[in-house]
Amino acid sequence: MTNPETDQRDREAAGQDAEAEREATARLAKAVRAAEQALIEFEIAMETFRVEVENFSRLHHQRLGPMYTRLDELDALIAEAIAARSGDPEDERRAREMRGLVLPMPGVEELFHGWMDSSGILPEAAAMLTDRPVQPPKRVRPSEEARRIYRELVRKAHPDLAREAAEQERRSAFVVRVNQAYAIGDENVLRQLAEEWEAGPPAPERQPSRSEELYARLEWLAQRKELLSAAAAELEASAIGSMLKMAPDDPDRLIDEIAEQLLAQVAEREAQLAELVG
């Protein structure tokens, strides 16, 4: 026999628990909204800085690139003049090194990218370079058992046998795997796929509660903020980012100052070169 007073207390306690859970969920939802807004603002600030760095990098290259190129050329000419005077092997090595900075040559790996393995140039690449015929790929002949399993799987798993879009998509993805295994004649993989199909689709996952969804959202926001923070730190630590931070309000002035320094270095190098070859 039930006790009316006990039942009433239980209902009141259940009601209080439900109300407390609703309040906690509401607070969690508010925290998620605040985190979302903070992340948006952070992304805006980071994208703004990224654009500024990109623009400054473009301006830096356009205005100062020719000066850097001229300095590299002068350094190479000076090293070559010193080597011609001294005949020292070390001076000659340095001259070649400086000239290499001005006229970089592609390496063998770059010329044959994708044509080499650990043992050297691949046979297909060698055939192309020597005009020899390329060896045709080895033909795959699936066994009778592989053919049988393949036919059964395709008959059972064909997407057209399903009506729902989700099931059609699942079947299409499965048949792609079946076709890949059959294309290389892999009987073992076909057997595994047959067992997988007989086991049936995976059981539907339990739908998370509202609180679980909110906690997961908060965790994702925190991870996203951490990734963006790392990217922002890397951007700020870059050469262009560090330069831009020196004059964030007037990057043109910084470019002018660097240009003056480079012009002075160019004049110094030209005078040094004239003295060496004069």
Image (spheres, rainbow, N blue to C red):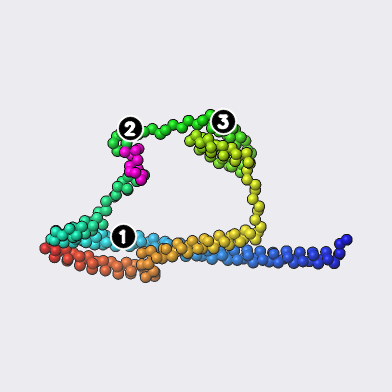
Q: Which residue is mark 2?
A: 133
Q: Is residue 162 above or below residue 210?
A: above
Q: Position of residue 72 (x, y in %)?
A: 24, 60
Q: Residue at x 42, y 63 (%)?
A: 234
C-alpha distance separating marks 2 and 1: 48 Å
**What is the quadrant of residue 275 in the picture?**
bottom left
C-alpha distance separating marks 3 and 2: 36 Å
* Residue 154 placement, left or right of 130: right
Q: Residue at x 35, y 34 (%)?
A: 134
Q: Which residue is mark 1?
A: 62
Q: Position of residue 123 (x, y in %)?
A: 34, 38
| Residue that lies at the very extreme toward the top in this rendered image | 144
Mark 1: which amino acid?
Gln
Mark 3: which amino acid?
Arg
Q: Which residues are magenta?
A: 115-126
Q: Residue at x 64, y 50 (%)?
A: 205
Q: Quick one: label 2 or label 1, which is nearer the N terminus?
A: 1
Mark 2: which amino acid?
Pro
Q: Is residue 131 above or below residue 37?
A: above
Nearer to the camera, 140 or 158: 140
The verdict on residue 120 being magenta is: yes
Nearer to the camera, 110 or 214: 110
Q: Residue at x 50, y 65 (%)?
A: 42
